[in-house]
Image (cartoon, rainbow, N blue to C red):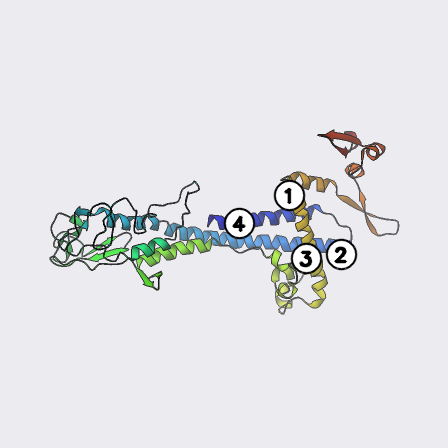
Amino acid sequence: MIANLKSEDDTTEQHLKQLRILAALLYCNETEIETQSALHRLMLSDYVETSNAKAIAAEAAIKATAKAAYWPGRLDEIVNVAQQMTTTPTDADGSICLANVAADTTTANGIMHSAPFTGNGLEDCRTGPTDETPATKFDLQPAALLQEIHSKTNVYTKKPTTATCGLTKVDSGRWYKTGAGPAVLKLAGDAIQMTAQNGNNAPTPQSLGTTASDGTHTTNPGSAMHDAVSAIAKAATQTKGPQLKTPNLLAENAWEEAKKDKLLQEALNPSEDVTAKYTDGLPKSQEVAYKRISKLYKELGTKLEQLTSGGEFEQRLRSLRKAKKSCNLNKGGSIEQESDRQDDKCAKKNKTACENAKCKWEEKDGKGECKPKEEEK
């Protein structure tokens, strides 16, 4: 779950960096300006829509996780009950509680009580989440553990008898004492339920709400174990929020599918009610505009790689903004770009050209760079 959220955060961070780069670029041609604006609308709307959907998914995940969080402890209780109720050296018919057999010896019911939680697939019962990266992967969904526990169907002994073991003492259909104890003993969040019998009749041995078929274990609906696994699975699923659409919408040869998307329709037609007008998708006439924003989006990807290589994104983005051009009308009345900063007059010049341009030449670690003089910035 955590890895999934981090992956989504990384993708969103890249998306926002591309938006910042897009805002730093200046275009003077009307078509280029329209393309830039359309792409900005698309990417911003995509971010807002995805963020809202993630917030809804996160809320559902928190609720599901809160419900699921009880279950690792309950599973641990199940195994503890199976291991610790040990008062006799065998598990013959007259056993009072679970057998306390010799180390490395398995009971007649298939449970080993030697080293804590080792053997028979129970060694991971106490694995839990921590703030540190665990040495072995921790997964809230105990699928493998359930498979092992499921095979231990006869968790309880065949004949609880005397008061030596209070848990399994049964008298006239009540646990512990006639008319005073519960008729049904529930443990581990109701995952274990035993109905009291009369005399020396033991409760029916139970599995824990799982069904095995050809090696595949599933939980039985209505069982506590089913509720546990379902809650945990839901918590994991709900963290998978929706992905950003922009990369797929503007991918190569994506027009036929992209033209049906409302976000793209609104980006290209911001003043129209696209829901009513484009029920069959965008018209062929808008494919050219679509290809322009697709091309610009790819250029943003390339620019992002250039600005992030070496880990100096913020510094390089500032430099990109400093190098902005201004838009002016030329003598013919058309718009042209013109540098309005001394930075551009000095950039990428060799030492001689730098001095001729009345800039200053700075050398560091054997490398030189032409920069504007402080008073001319």
Q: CA distance from mark 1 to mark 3?
A: 21 Å
Could you say where residue 100 lies in the image, as x and y percent from the top left?
19, 47
Q: Label 2: state its secondary structure.
A: helix
Front in this rendered view, residue 348 or 193: 348
Which residue position is annotated with label 1?
308
Residue type marked 2: Thr
Q: CA distance from mark 4 to mark 2?
A: 35 Å
Residue 157 in the image: state x and y as whole percent. Answer: 18, 54
In the rendered image, residue 337, in percent from the top left (x then y), is placed at 80, 47
Please state the total of marks drawn on the protein image: 4
The numbered dot on residue 294 is 3
Q: Which residue is mark 4?
A: 7
> Vertically, is 174 above or below 26?
below
Q: Is residue 243 left or right of residue 159?
A: right
Query: Taking 32 as reference, is 258 above or below it?
Result: below
Q: Nearer the viewer, mark 4 or mark 2?
A: 4
Q: Earlier in the sequence, mark 4 or mark 2?
A: 4
- Return the x and y of residue 11 as percentages of the image width and height: 57, 50
Image quadrant containing the C terminus: top right
SS state under label 3? helix
Q: Left or right of 235: which side holds 113?
A: left
Q: Does 250 sit left or right of 231 as displayed?
A: right
Q: Residue furthest front?
A: 104
Distance from the alpha carbon under mark 1 to that under mark 2:
28 Å
Q: Amino acid at mark 3?
A: Ser
Mark 1 vs mark 2: give the one in front: 1
* Residue mark closest to the camera, 1 vs 3: 1
